Amino acid sequence: MPAKHDQMRGTNTLLVLEYIRHNGESTRRSIQKETGLSWAAVSTISTDLISKKVLMELPCSERVPGRNPVFLDFVPKRNLTLGIEINAEGITALLLDLRCDVVDHYIEPLESLDRDWVIDQMIRAIELLMSRNALDPSAILGIGIATQGTVDRDGAISVYNSFFNDWRNVPLKRIFEERFGIPVHVMHDPACIALAEQWNRRFTDKDNFAVIRLSYGIGMSHIVQGKPVTGSNGIAGELGHMVLDRNGPLCSCGNRGCMESYSSIRGLAHRIIAEYHAGNLSLPESLTQMNDRDIEFMSGLVSWSAAEAAEGNEVLLNIFDDAAYFLGVGIANVVSIFDPNCIILTGGLLDYQDLILDKAKTVAKELAWSLSEFEIIISREGRSQAAVGAALYFINDAFSSLSSRLI
């Protein structure tokens, strides 16, 4: 009986916390009315959470007739979460509160692509955020890490990242838990972006959607019943390595004709350079030496090429046309297999959406299973999405798990 009572009290506590999370500072009376809990339950739970320094009382800022109400809200600078993303563009580190509002942030380019340099730079970014906010580890619920490439299903190891040197089976969870004494979880960056989109758009567990990140590579996360689908080995969502033409261009994975070899920034860069070497295209001298780990070079080459395509260069128009077509095919395959109600597109390739988006949408609608109903949405959330989603792993757990530190 006591165990069942404790479970019920824990469930009710999470209900109170979730209400305040979504509604901001709230009175006990409003919590009671909207959650359906008894006045005694709300009073007992709020008193307990105040003693644990999860909640605090705030006086009403305006005079009202009768007794002024007292509001409950989260205690600032406690139960925060760190979200950090590492990718070829650099490091984004965010400190977030329980409502997923950014308390502080730090963004910088990578100093080196070598494994030890990247890890040291991540450590320094976390130390900086904790230091300038005067935080000790007890104030942090967890550190969420978003990374490109492959992550194991347990959220412990970054298995592979093609942009970094000597980056195989890197035990990020162990390294950072030993360094900071804070729980750590590692995730594939599209899954993190999906969690951020889920929060920002107020999707519920009934929403079945997919996020496709179109950047130097291509990644996907599919959300079902509120959680990312990870697969048996943690590598679900490798949409970029879906082979669409076995005789197509060579992909970074070693196969030919992957979606990524057509519809990513790196894939576009390789195809443009191939046309240059075939004598079909003239390029500025500074854009002729391909380096598929040099993101500035690839960005510059694709940006220049997009401008030339917009001016009518047929060779480049065909390359962007192929990117649009195969993106549409990839989306159609996702829709036909998983039946999401929406596809959310994000990433740097969308800087050139005027050249690819309309055709990609048309192809997706034409080739998807005829009874499918879906929309294609462009994300507007910006670079920090993955870091926000990495932090949300711990924030969501704090509001849903009976083992939550909040209760």
Image (cartoon, helix red, strand yellow):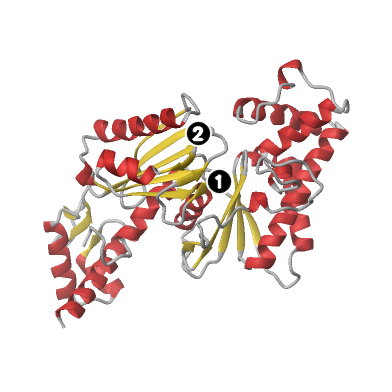
Residue placed most toward the observer, 120 or 100 = 120
* Disc on the earlier residue, 2 or 1: 2
Q: Would residue 344 be found to the left or right of residue 406 on screen?
A: right
Q: Which residue is mark 1?
A: 380
Q: Residue 328, percent across and down?
A: 74, 54
> Up-down: is 165 above or below 50?
above
Q: Which mark is residue 74?
A: none
Instruction: In the displayed orientation, state which residue is furthest to the top.
Output: 285
Residue placed most toward the observer, 271 or 60 = 271
Q: Quadrant of residue 163?
A: top right
> Up-down: is 358 above or below 287?
below
C-alpha separation, residue under disc 2 versus residue under disc 1? 34 Å
Residue placed most toward the observer, 342 or 153 = 153
Q: Quadrant of residue 365?
A: bottom right
Q: Tag count in the figure?
A: 2
> Up-down: is 190 above or below 216?
below
Q: Which mark is residue 166?
A: 2
Q: Residue at x 70, y 61 (%)?
A: 333
